Image (cartoon, grey):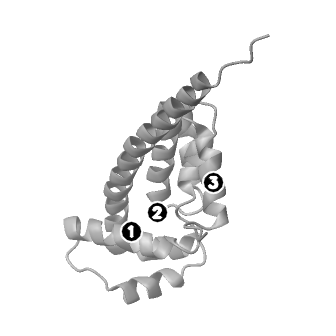
Amino acid sequence: MIRLFPRGIRYRYWKLIRIRASPHEVALGLGIGIFCGALPIMGIQSLVAIPMAFVWRASIAASLVGVWWTNPLTFIPIYYSEYLIGGLLFADKILTYQEFYERFSQISDLDGVLALGGDIFGPMTYGSLVLGGSLGLICYLTMVRALEERRRRKEIRKSKIKPAEK
């Protein structure tokens, strides 16, 4: 049997599914995590997701799972997508992927981020709000339905199994 997803992704999926909270809390936590993961604040996204999940009474564990979609392997393509979205809305000139990659690969500290300036960081921030908000909402709607359906099926299975009579 060919496995569709790598082991780490399957493991996080099952951890998310098995969180003991309402489907709304888990899905909202995941949506918050997806939104925070899109923000161009690599390294501190979790520190933003945790208080947001707490304030909105969502699952903190699910929000942390949601943040993990941006990581050192995926952040440049994701940030470029955000930059394009923001650039289409607000920028005059849009950099190519190669130019964007070269500017981002030179960053080694906070001064490097500040050196990007408003011509890159501004559109990227606006784009991250649009992309993160959209993906977070889609994720919430999809996950709340999936979790409700899973729990419904589990209840049906339990009701079919009757305890042995003595």
Label disc, if present, on residue 12 of the rendered structure: 3
Q: Which residue is mark 2?
A: 40
Q: Earlier in the sequence, mark 1 or mark 3?
A: 3
- State which mark lies toward you, 2 or 3: 3
Rounded to the nearest angstrom, the CA distance separating label 2 from label 3 is 23 Å
Determine which residue is flagged by label 1: 121
Q: Where 31 sits versus 102, above or below?
A: above
Q: Residue at x 34, y 58 (%)?
A: 131
Q: Are marks 2 and 1 in contact (CB under 8 Å)?
A: yes
- Extreme top residue here? 166
* Mark closer to the chain start, 2 or 1: 2
Mark linked to residue 71 = none
Q: How many marks?
A: 3
Amino acid found under the numbered disc labelled 3: Arg
| Nearer to us: label 2 or label 1 | 2
Inter-mark Cα distance, 1 to 3: 31 Å
Instruction: Write the residue at 26% across / 80% down.
Output: 94
Amino acid type for the residue under numbered disc 2:
Pro
User: Along the horizontal axis of the image, is 97 left or right of 111?
Assistant: left
In percent of width and height, residue 64 lies at: 60, 49
Helix, strand or loop status at disc 1: helix
Secondary structure of residue under mark 3: helix
| 1 vs 3, front mark | 3
Residue type, mark 1 in image: Phe
Image point 60% across, 45% down: which residue?
Answer: 16
The quadrant the C terminus occupies is top right
From this view, report whether residue 67 is shown above or below residue 17.
Answer: below
Q: In percent of the image, x 31 and y 67: which residue is there?
A: 123
User: Is 95 placed left or right of 6 in the picture?
Assistant: left
